[in-house]
Amino acid sequence: MSAPVLVDQADCPTETWADPARGKIAWKTLISGDVTNSTSIVAGIAIMAKGDTFALHSHPQPELYFGLEGEVDVQINGAAHCLKPGVALFIPGDAVHGVLAADQPVRWFYTFAADAFPDIAYTFA
């Protein structure tokens, strides 16, 4: 049995992809077995500035986005879905998704059913 984990986003480093072909998106990992004493769930906050992109990609795990700030179209299997504060967006496993370009600063909470972020097998289009 694991113990509760309390994480303040202010204490989490901002991360980015090393490969610019994946897009210019940043994130803060909140919960992930490689950085917290946790299992079964990964959670964090995605951060995009105006003009940033998040290349189309897929992964076997379903994912949930919950809008925190700003508004952006998330492409899922070729269809646009407007993510904004207070809106939850379920992304099925293996669905091709991403953000072609942010028109404004945007932030969203994301979560996967996985033990750690490195377990997410991203495939970029």
Image (spheres, helix red, strand yellow):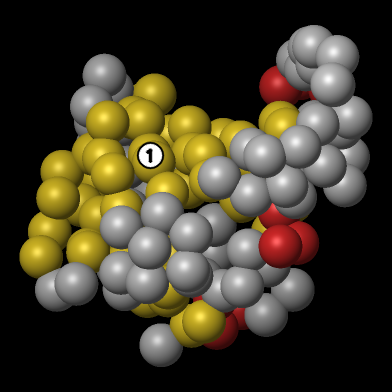
* SS label for mark 1: strand
Screen quadrant of the N terminus: top right
- Disc 1 marks a residue whose amino acid type is Tyr
98 w.r.t. 66: above or below: below
- Across and down, in percent, residue 90 comes to 28, 44
- For the point 52% across and 39% down, the residue is 111
Screen quadrant of the C terminus: bottom left
4 w.r.t. 62: above or below: above
Instruction: Determine which residue is flagged by label 1.
Output: 65
Q: Residue furthest left?
A: 79
68 w.r.t. 59: above or below: above
Residue 20 falls left or right of residue 92: right
The answer to whether residue 68 is visible is yes
Q: Nearer the viewer, residue 121 or 80?
A: 121
- Across and down, in percent, residue 120 comes to 63, 63
- For the point 37% across and 71% down, the residue is 94
Residue 1 falls left or right of residue 46: right
- For the point 34% across and 30% down, the residue is 67
Q: Residue furthest bottom?
A: 125
The answer to whether residue 13 is visible is no
Number of marks in the rendered image? 1
Residue 26 falls left or right of residue 8: left
124 w.r.t. 82: above or below: below
* Label 1 environment density (alpha carbons within 10 Å; few <14, some 14–19, many ≥20): many
- Across and down, in percent, residue 34 comes to 87, 47
- Across and down, in percent, residue 100 comes to 30, 68
Residue 83: image quadrant is top left
